[in-house]
Amino acid sequence: MPTALVTGASSGIGAAFARRLASDGYELVLVARNESRLTAGRLDLLKIGAPAVEVLTADLTDAGQRDAVCARLADAKKPVSLLVSNAGMALGKGFLASTAAELQAQLDLNVSAVMMLTHAALPGMIARGHGGIITISSIASMLPGRGSAYGAFKSWVTAFSEGIGMSVRSKGIRMVAVCPGFVRTEFHERAGIDMQGNPEWMFVPMDVLVGQSLAGLRAGKSVVIPGALYKTIAAAVKFAPRSLVRRATNLVDGRTRD
Ligand code: NAP
C-alpha cells in the first residue's frame, strides 16, 4: 500500500488529511509534537481503514527533531509516496510585537520544515519515478500582509511549491500548494485570534479542502484554492491593481495580528 507522511496530523487540516488518506487505504506516518493525541488518532485511523500507522513525535522548529523526520522520509526501505507538509502556525500579533525568538520559530516551522522535508522526500520519489507533495500554504500568500510575517512566509511556500514542482514534474512527481481561506481548526485559538464575529460562510468546509487538494494533486495542478469564495477572492486579487488590493485588505482588516 502507498504510504503518506502528514505533518501537523494531531489536529485540524492535518488530521482531516490523515482521516481521508486512511479511508483511501494509505499507510500513514503521523508527525506532530503531541504524542498522546497522535497515539489516540492512530487507533481511529486503523479503524477507518489505514493498514498501518506510525507515530513520529517531533517539534519541527527543532533542527535535530526535524532531521529525524527527514531521515524517515529518505528511508528507501519504507518509501513514502505522499508528503503532506501541513504543520504551521500564526503568532497572533504583529511583526514588531513579536520577539525575535517567536519569529524564528515561526520561520523554522512555516518555511524551513517545508523546505527540508521536501528536500529529504524528493530523491527517493524521483528514483522510484513517482510521488506527490502537498504543501499547505494560505490565501494570505496572495495578499499583502497586515504587518506580520505570516503572509510572507506563506508566499514563500506557494512560490517554492510552484517552482520545485515544475522542476520535478517530468520525473513523475506532482507537487501542489493549497491556499485555504478560513478553516475551522485550532489555528486561530492557538494564536489567540478571536474568530467569533466571522460568519460561517467565510469558513471553507474541511471535506471541500481535502477533496479539492487531492483532486488538484491528481490533476497535476500547481496551486489549489479550495472553495468558491476564496477562488473568487484570488481571481479578484490577481486582476485588480495591487494598490487597490492593499487598500481593500486594510479596509477589511487593518489590524496586525498574524
Ligand atoms: P491547527 O489545528 O492548529 O493544527 C496545527 C498542527 O500543526 C497541529 O497538528 C500541531 O500539532 C502541529 N504543529 C504546530 N506546531 C508544531 C511544531 N512546532 N512541530 C510540529 N508540529 C507542529 O491548525 P490548522 O488550521 O490545521 O493548520 C494547518 C496549516 O493550515 C497551517 O500551515 C496553517 O498555516 C494553514 N492554514 C490554516 C488556515 C485556517 O484558517 N485554519 C487557513 C490557511 C492556512 P502539535 O501541537 O501536536 O505539535
Image: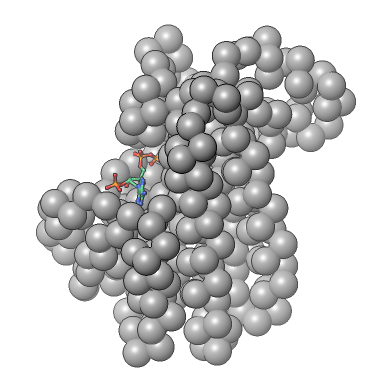
Q: Is residue 82 above or below residue 234?
A: below
Q: Residue at (65%, 49%) from the top-left corner? A: 156
Residue 106 in the image, given as x and y percentages of width and height:
48, 43
* Whole-percent x, y for residue 126 in the image: 58, 83
The residue nearer to you, when weighing 155 against 59, is: 59
- Specify whether 249 is left or right of 194: right
Q: How many numbered tags mark residues here?
A: 0
The coloring applied to the image is one colour
Residue 131 in view, yes or no: no
| Residue 228, x across and y down, in percent | 59, 32
Q: Which quarter of the picture shows residue 35?
A: bottom left
Residue depicted at x 55% and y 82%: 123
Residue 183 rendering spot, x and y as whole percentages:
43, 32
Q: Is residue 253 left or right of residue 31?
A: right
Q: Is residue 139 above or below residue 15?
A: above
Q: Measuring 59% from the left and 64% from the top, which residue is drawn there?
A: 175
Question: With 231 as the anchor, is 191 left or right in this view?
Answer: left
Q: Quadrant of the N terminus?
A: bottom left
Q: Quadrant of ligand 1?
A: top left
Can residue 242 be seen in the rendering of this structure? Answer: yes
Q: Is residue 100 above or below residue 160?
A: above
Residue 105 vs residue 120, the one in the foreground: 105
- Name the residue: 16% across, 64% down: 46
Is residue 159 positioned above or below 204 on the image? below
Q: Nearer the viewer, residue 197 or 55?
A: 55
Q: Which residue lies most toward the front here? A: 100
